[in-house]
Image (tube, rainbow, N blue to C red):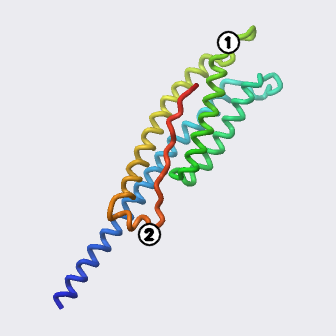
Amino acid sequence: MDANLWLSGILAIGLFWCVGVYNRITRLRARSLESFVSVAAKMHRYRALFLEHSHPSKVSETPTALQQLMLQLEQLDQMTRDAQACPWDKAVLAVLTAKGSEVWAVWGALRTAPADLAGAALPDNLMQEWDANSRALQHAIAGFNQILVDYNEAIAQFPAIVITSFLGFKPAGQIAILYEA
């Protein structure tokens, strides 16, 4: 009788521990989803800013570089929407980082382009709001990445790794902090 009681107690403790590990991992995943919403909102804001400060209705009059930026921003928007389904997936975050780098490369080329007779390629208020959004995005990405670091540490701790590998939890990727060219 005494051995059965001990065995039952050990099994109960083990079960509660497994449930605790699972709950911690799912809470971290939920936090990453919430945090990614902030990142996504700031990424979507770039396209909104561009549309707000330029007039895409006059596409034929828009210089090629601005058309290229608009195309890159539309692709970034789509990739950001796709990433919201699984924002901790390494491949998804790598693609999102690469697309962000392409946007910043085009933006940097436009920003540093000399003014012509029609004036600067980009309005000053667009550049100021873009910069403010960039700072907010960097902060959101840093918070998101920290949650993913916590998640990766949680699933790699022994003996939790036994449960997390059995349940199929995989290490998360991160978004490389995007810098403007």
Picture residue at 53% right of the left edge, 33% below the top: 178
Q: Is residue 121 above or below residue 132?
A: above
Q: Nearer the viewer, residue 126 or 117?
A: 117
Q: Residues within 10 Å of mark 1 (few under 14, many from 20)?
A: few
Q: Position of residue 122 (x, y in %)?
A: 66, 19
Q: Position of residue 102 (x, y in %)?
A: 64, 33
Q: Is residue 18 above or below residue 38?
A: below
Question: Image quarter for residue 9?
Answer: bottom left
Picture residue at 46% right of the left edge, 55% below the top: 171
- Tag 2: amino acid: Phe
Which residue is denoted by mark 1 in the rendering? 114
Q: Nearer the viewer, residue 18 or 37?
A: 18
Q: Quadrant of the C terminus?
A: top right
Residue sitting farthest toward the bottom: 1
Q: Position of residue 78 (x, y in %)?
A: 66, 44
Left or right of residue 132, residue 31 in this image: left
Q: Helix, strand, or loop for circle 2?
A: helix
- Tag 1: amino acid: Pro
Q: Residues within 10 Å of mark 2 (few under 14, many from 20)?
A: few
> What separation in Å lies between label 2 and label 1 (alpha carbons)?
58 Å
Q: Helix, strand, or loop for circle 1?
A: loop
Of pointers 2 and 1, the one earlier in the residue sequence: 1
Q: Is residue 9 above or below residue 103?
A: below
Which residue is denoted by mark 2 in the rendering? 166
Picture residue at 40% right of the left edge, 57% below the top: 27
